């Protein structure tokens, strides 16, 4: 059975030892590692223990074969938006109804109205006929060489879009013919 223990643990910034210590009763980091990699069978009992330790519902630990999970593809830092070296599964807080794949953006530095620790969920819109309705909304768009631009969509001329990054003194980024635009649908902020 394919599980998401490692993805969820890393997303929450926990080590194997952290998860092992949070289990009731506590276990070893080696046991958690074996369960993550599938070297040890993930029973219902273990699934419930680890889910409680991670603070998630047990069904989030099991990866289904039907659809690919949403991906965390970029992060927002002081200098702008940066692509992750390797996209990873994002943990969906609730089911978001709508068409198009979901993406997530991790905010690692406070920029504009976004705070460090925020997670922004975006809906991928590939149909350029729908891009006009995204004006004045926060969007994420792919750029050449695996980079991204994030900010307010302020202009569109055919397939060329202009995005104004958050924060003071930022210059607009113009992208000619992005493959898709991800429009912000949900902001998840830790309390």
Image (cartoon, rainbow, N blue to C red):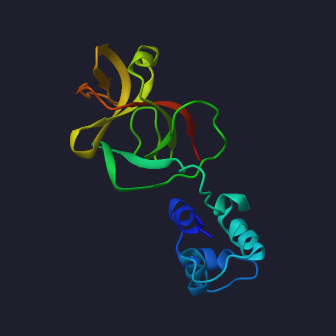
Q: How many marks?
A: 0
Judge whether residue 166 can be spotted in this image. Answer: no
Residue 60: x percent and y percent?
Answer: 66, 58
Say whether residue 6 is left or right of residue 159: right
- Is residue 98 shown above or below 101? above
Residue 3: x percent and y percent?
Answer: 60, 67
Judge whether residue 61 can be spotted in this image. Answer: yes
Q: Quadrant of residue 151?
A: top left
Q: Residue at x 52, y 59 (%)?
A: 11
Say whether residue 13 is left or right of residue 131: right
Q: Quadrant of the N terminus?
A: bottom right
- Is residue 170 shown above or below 60? above
Q: Residue at x 32, y 30 (%)?
A: 165
- Is residue 78 shown above or below 4? above
Pick the front one: 151 or 1: 1
Residue 97: x percent and y percent?
Answer: 64, 33
Name, please, the residue furthest toward the right.
Answer: 45
Say whether residue 23 is left or right of residue 112: right
Residue 122: x percent and y percent?
Answer: 49, 35
Q: Residue at x 78, y 75 (%)?
A: 45
Q: Residue at x 61, y 60 (%)?
A: 63
């Amino acid at each position: 059975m394919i599980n998401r223990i490692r993805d969820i643990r890393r997303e929450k910034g926990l080590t194997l030892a952290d998860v092992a210590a949070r289990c009731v009763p506590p276990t070893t980091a080696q046991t958690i590692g074996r369960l993550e990699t599938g070297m040890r069978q993930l029973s219902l009992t273990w699934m419930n223990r680890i889910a409680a330790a991670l603070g998630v519902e047990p069904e989030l630990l099991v990866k289904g074969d039907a659809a690919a999970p949403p991906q965390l593809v970029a992060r927002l830092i002081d200098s702008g938006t940066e692509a992750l070296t390797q996209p990873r599964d994002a943990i969906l807080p609730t089911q978001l109804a709508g068409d198009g794949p979901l993406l997530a953006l991790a905010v690692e530095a406070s920029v504009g109205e976004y705070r460090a620790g925020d997670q922004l969920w975006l809906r991928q819109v590939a149909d350029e006929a729908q891009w006009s309705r995204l004006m004045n909304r926060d969007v994420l768009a792919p750029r050449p060489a695996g980079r991204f631009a994030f900010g307010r969509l302020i202009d569109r001329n055919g397939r060329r879009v202009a995005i104004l990054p958050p924060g003071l003194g930022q210059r607009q980024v113009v992208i000619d013919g992005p493959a898709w635009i991800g429009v912000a649908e949900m902001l998840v902020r830790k309390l």
